[in-house]
Amino acid sequence: MNEEKYVPKSKLGQWFDSRLPLLSLAHHLRDYPTPKNLNYWWTFGAILTFCLVAQIITGIVLAMHYVAHADLAFESVEHIMRDVNYGWLIRYFHANGSSMFFLAVYVHIFRGLYYGSYKSPREIIWIIGMLIYILMMATAFMGYVLPWGQMSFWAATVITSLFSAIPIVGDSIVGWLWGGYAVGSPTLTRFYSLHYLLPFLIFALVVLHIWALHIPGNTNPVGIDIKQPSKDTVPFSPYVAVKDLYALIIFLIITAGFVFFAPNILSHPDNYIKANQMVTPTHIVPEWYLLPFYAILRAVPDKLGGVVVMFASLFILMFLPWLDTSKVRSAVFRPLYKIFFWVLVIDVIVLGYMGAKPPEGLYLLIGRVATIYYFAHFILVMPILGFKEKTPPLPISISNPVLGGDKKTVNDR
Amino acid sequence: MGSSYAVLATIVALFILFLFLSWIFVSIRFVDKEQKEETTERRYFLFTASYALGAVAVGAAAWPLIDQMNPDASVKALATTEVDISNISLGKTITVLWRGKPIFIRRRTQNEISEAQNVDLNELKDPQKDEDRVKKSEWLVMTGVCTHLGCVPLGDKGDFGGWFCPCHGSHYDTSGRIRKGPAPTNLEIPKYEFINSNTIIIG
């Protein structure tokens, strides 16, 4: 970053800033040079930050009324819904907020995949982002258990039982996770404790994510390196800040649509039945945002194999910066990758659909094919494409999108 | 509690062994070296030893924090359940709760028993004779928890006249043995005794 050194105007400001450079930090965040061609897909970082803060605030409020005990949890959630002032609004916002959070994170991840945001020098940003994503799934899963309905209880049972697939120590690990011989009150209280803790870990990782982003600066739709600051950049505030805010408002309108008009459409009616350890609901499915991984788990006809492949499908994303061998960042200049990218998007949606269906017959077969393709995309398509693909020449700068613009402008930037 | 001490004792024993071996290794190196190098070697040894000691201290401090999550004394105390089975008629199953898990107790019909006994063991994924799974062939007592991912299978369902797990489609036969689907093993048989012909004690 080639920013000028900031010196506060007032004496007091200088005195404070030389002792703790908070004012310099605020100045940096305001004037941070961003590429001038960022499109709306780039607004999801700000939307996600908002989502995290909103979930933390509504969560802290819900924790004031919720009781984490197997005998009381379900009733306390109903108490929040019926008795607590605006409890229904806060809970519905928190529950639908998690879905919107995941919707935004998926857009954000696919944005990164399309524009090659994970490529050098931004590998660390990508890896931290993946860690955030994994923590988000853990947090969401534990939050889903807290209302102690039928879906909560059986989701907890099925997901924790995944660890029983580990040879030799599997059963001891599951017993350790449960704090008993089955999912029960001890499981609920520890999930509550961790559900409260993890968002703050996510918050810390988000700080690192943004810090790591501010070292090389944003990538951009054209995907070329730009000088910062230059004719190709604009200050974050007001240009990008206002664009982020506008996108956030649209996003909040959609969220409000769910909260006020269809608050339960993304959840499952069985979760309004109190947990019963004697009866499993006839059709159990995870929340929609975990469905593609659930389909991968069920695609493998072996218990340990299914668990291994499911975790592999997640961790393979961390190696993406090295699996993608192409020197060209943005899919805008990668005619073949652009096609494969959309095939992957469809593949993941198909996996999600198969995850919601019973694992038999055609559903299972399609699920298996989609699983194989998912891995093939990362292990075969991405490395090979980097060598085989013929890419058109890249522009010299954002201001000169047409190749071979006159030399004077190039030297000016 | 006993197992935690065993783990700690093992860690300490391994650490002492490690120190001893490191000492032997370093003293052998000492013999051939000049005085100068000797002091650096000694310093490295001391560093390594301190790090190792620090690691043991951290491990010992962390253990109570990890072990607190294991089943506690109050959970372990609920370890037996007595069940009156005199009211179960032929071909019916009752479900009782033992240590938070459902236990199926089924009074099997003659058909089911012969079906279970006449299966060719080579057909089974987890081969086990029906005789080894029951104390009295009329009474099948087993944990009603699918060995795949822990759901409760549904009775009188599935392709083998036994149980069927709705979560991921495992089929069990009239002896609770896995026949089809992702579950790796047969439904578990808990520890139980017939106190008399009308009562069993589980656990």
Image (cartoon, helix red, strand yellow):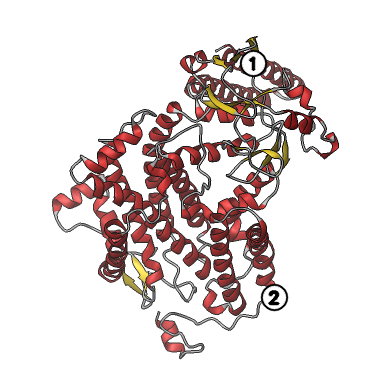
Question: Dot 1 lies on which element?
Answer: strand
**Does residue B4 appear to the left or right of A252 in the view shown?**
right
Label 2 Cα crowd, 10 Å radius (few <14 / some 14-19 / many 20+): few
Q: Image quarter for residue A318?
A: bottom right
Label 1 sits on what residue type?
Tyr
Residue A384 image point, x, y percent: 69, 69
Across and down, in percent, residue A321 comes to 58, 60
Provide residue A14's location: percent of width, then percent of height: 19, 52
| Residue annotated with mark 2 | A388
Say which of A165 and B104 sits in front.
Answer: B104
| Residue located beneath label 1 in the image | B192
The mark closer to the camera, 2 or 1, is 1
Q: Taking the image as drawn, is residue A119 in sight?
A: no
Report x, y in % for residue A129.
47, 54
Chain letter of the residue carrying label 2: A
Query: Who's the residue at 41% across and 86% down the image?
Result: A409
Q: Who's the residue at 65% across and 57% down the image?
A: A364
Q: Determine the chain carrying the residue at label 1.
A: B
Q: CA distance from mark 2 to mark 1?
A: 66 Å
- Placement of the C terminus of chain A among the 4 image quadrants: bottom left
| SS at mark 2 in the image | helix
Q: Is A45 left, or right, of B140 in this rendering?
A: left
Name the one closer to the observer, A91 or B121. B121
Q: Are marks 2 and 1 in contact (CB under 8 Å)?
A: no
User: Residue flagged by tag 2: what amino acid is it?
Assistant: Lys
